[in-house]
Amino acid sequence: MSEDNRFVAVSFATLARAEEALAAVERLDPVDAAIVVRDPSGRVQLHQTRDTGAGEGAVAGGTAGLLGGLLLGVPVGAALAGILAGGGAAAFDTGIPDDQLRQLGKELEGGQAVLCVLVEPEAAPGLAAALEPFGGASLP
């Protein structure tokens, strides 16, 4: 997470309300956004919008490598290189750290949700305006 970006966390009574707020926030093209919810049984769940898993990165890298390799005449080698590069790149979490999200989730009551958003500094005023109609409580 870049030091310059602004992190905002807003709690909502329900997951549905957090999802409505997320839809409004997505129009601002945040660096990262996630909803953390604690289900009635106490389990913390992360609903991430920008996080690419290692498997997804490997598939994307492998596909790009295969296509590039077909053009260069070495499809298998290029596909393997793409798989390794894609999987390795996705292993680095460039958004909101999962540990931070899980810690917020532990503080919730069952059924509550927190919308977490990471934006560039110039987008912060727009973020506040986008979230205002949904209420919620801003977390420190």
Image: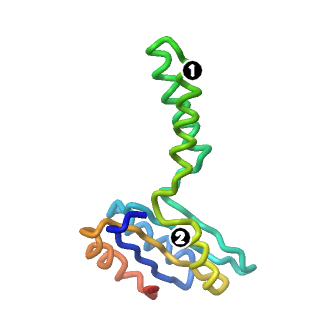
* Image location of residue 85, percent across then percent down: 52, 37
Between the C-alphas of marks 1 and 2, the distance is: 39 Å
Q: Give 113 or 3, whichever is nearer the viewer.
A: 3
* Image location of residue 64, percent across then percent down: 48, 29
Which numbered disc, 1 or 2, marks the residue that appears first in the sequence? 2
- Residue 52 got which mark? none
Q: Around disc 1, counting alpha carbons within 10 Å, would you say few (fewer than 14), some (14 to 19), or many (20 or more)? A: some
Residue at 57 percent across and 42 percent down: it is 87
Q: Which residue is mark 1?
A: 77
Q: Around disc 2, counting alpha carbons within 10 Å, would you say few (fewer than 14), some (14 to 19), or many (20 or more)? A: many
Secondary structure state at the residue bearing disc 1: helix
Q: Which residue is mark 2?
A: 35
Type of the residue with mark 2? Ile
Position of the N terminus, as image quadrant, is bottom left
* Image location of residue 28, percent across then percent down: 32, 64
Residue at 47 percent across and 73 percent down: it is 116
In which quadrant of the rendered view does residue 106 lie? Answer: bottom right
Q: Give 18 or 102, whichever is nearer the viewer.
A: 102
In which quadrant of the rendered view does residue 128 lie? Answer: bottom left
Secondary structure state at the residue bearing disc 2: strand
Position of the C terminus, as image quadrant, is bottom left
* Image location of residue 71, percent across then percent down: 44, 15
